[in-house]
Amino acid sequence: MRLFHARGYDAVGVAELGAELGIKPPSFYAAFGSKAGLFERTLRRYAAGEANVFARARAEGGDVATVIGRTLALAAALYPGQGGTAGCLVLDGARNSADPEAQALADAAKREGRAAVRDFIATEAPDRADALADLVVVTMMGMSAAARDGADRGRLERVAAMMDRAFRRELSGA
Amino acid sequence: MRLFHARGYDAVGVAELGAELGIKPPSFYAAFGSKAGLFERTLRRYAAGEANVFARARAEGGDVATVIGRTLALAAALYPGQGGTAGCLVLDGARNSADPEAQALADAAKREGRAAVRDFIATEAPDRADALADLVVVTMMGMSAAARDGADRGRLERVAAMMDRAFRRELSGA
DNA sequence: GTTTTTCTATAGTGACCACTACAAAAAAAT
DNA sequence: ATTTTTTTGTAGTGGTCACTATAGAAAAAC
């Protein structure tokens, strides 16, 4: 997971993935079927863990604005990463990949994440849920890209705080 | 330029670039020196043309809030692209590239663009210029990523309009 | 202890990568 | 018209990619 997260799907080879796991290519293919097979598992584990900042924010309760603000703050804390694993694996892991299978897997994970945010927002603002979900998703994509380009936690948190205010303002009615 | 923009630096080969230009590999290397050499030229042409939405927005005049709002609106109109060339070449062209030279070239272009925005914002809000520039850059990165993932012009313009309001609010003093 | 089965390592598959040596053709110069 | 220079196409360089055939080692069954 670390390698995919740090360098993206295409830039890491099967031999290197095997070395990280302590296995050789034949065992790799016996275990995962293909490079994309491991990527799919990796995405699943990633989205099921602490990287799902929206799920974590929602678990603590609160109204829509509170949960979204907490989501952005958690993303700002998470995205700088460590050991080169910056940004979000789902949002940027298959960016510019030449492999359509990897793109499709990441795309499905993104759609799932966006749908969860959209449906949650819809509980308070059903007719503006799409627009507000786009605002949140675009913000998270931007924060992930900025983190990948070296933005540290302080800068991301500053942006997250401004976006929290923006979201509250938009939610409460233009 | 079209190929780099549509698929990213790594995913397009020299043979294919030559075919697009109507030349064979040896002529390609005589003309550009290397694949990264063409990428550098491509970035320069891109940033010197209509893709530099901030320069275009600034050329029309107005105060900081007006120019930034116009910048975001122009980006929303440009980023959906055509023929697969979605998003911004500078912001996403070398994303996840395995070639450090391509990354460095894109990085330099990004820093240049951010500095221009920052310095412009500093003419009205010198002590908040960094934070506000981050807000603008993160927004544009997010819009570029969203466009690459298939967001159409309508959705991007909706986000741009909300971000315009957010920027105005932040600029006028939290 | 012998046999059978499962696993894994070595080594290599063809395909594609950025890049180039070389020779033929076109252009320029004398 | 001949020579020199530049340009270009053919073909191939070593390297790396995802992926696999085969054979030997470990483990399980009897």
Image: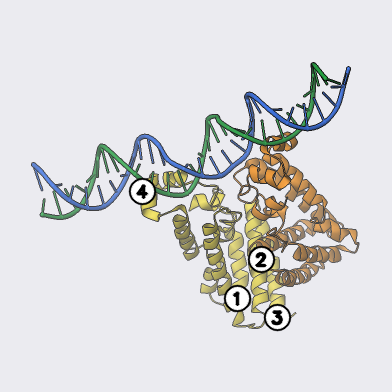
Chain colours: A orange, B yellow, C green, D blue
Secondary structure found at label 2 = helix
| B139 relative to D14 in the view: left or right | right
Residue bearing the label numbered 2: B138
| Mark nearer the N terminus (3 vs 4) | 4
| Mark nearer the N terminus (3 vs 1) | 1
Secondary structure found at label 4 = helix
- At x 37%, y 54%, the residue is B31
Q: Chain of mark 4?
A: B
Q: Are marks 3 and 1 in contact (CB under 8 Å)?
A: no
| A58 relative to C9 in the view: left or right | right
Between marks 1 and 4 in the image, the one whose residue lies nearer the viewer: 4
Other-residue count near label 3 (Cα within 10 Å), few / some / many at <14 / 14–19 / ≥20:
few
Tell which of B64 and A173 is nearer to you. B64
- Please, what is the three-letter code of the amino acid marked with disc 3? Ser
Can you give x and y, in whole percent of width and height, for residue B17 in the image? 45, 47
| Mark nearer the N terminus (1 vs 4) | 4
Tell which of B45 and A144 is nearer to you. A144
- Please, what is the three-letter code of the amino acid marked with disc 1? Arg
- Please, what is the three-letter code of the amino acid marked with disc 2? Val
Residue bearing the label numbered 4: B27
Q: Mark on residue B172?
A: 3
Tell which of A13 and B83 is nearer to you. A13
Which corner quadrant holds the C terminus of chain A? bottom right
Q: Chain of mark 3?
A: B
| A152 relative to A53 in the view: left or right | left
Between marks 2 and 3 in the image, the one whose residue lies nearer the viewer: 2
Between marks 3 and 4 in the image, the one whose residue lies nearer the viewer: 4
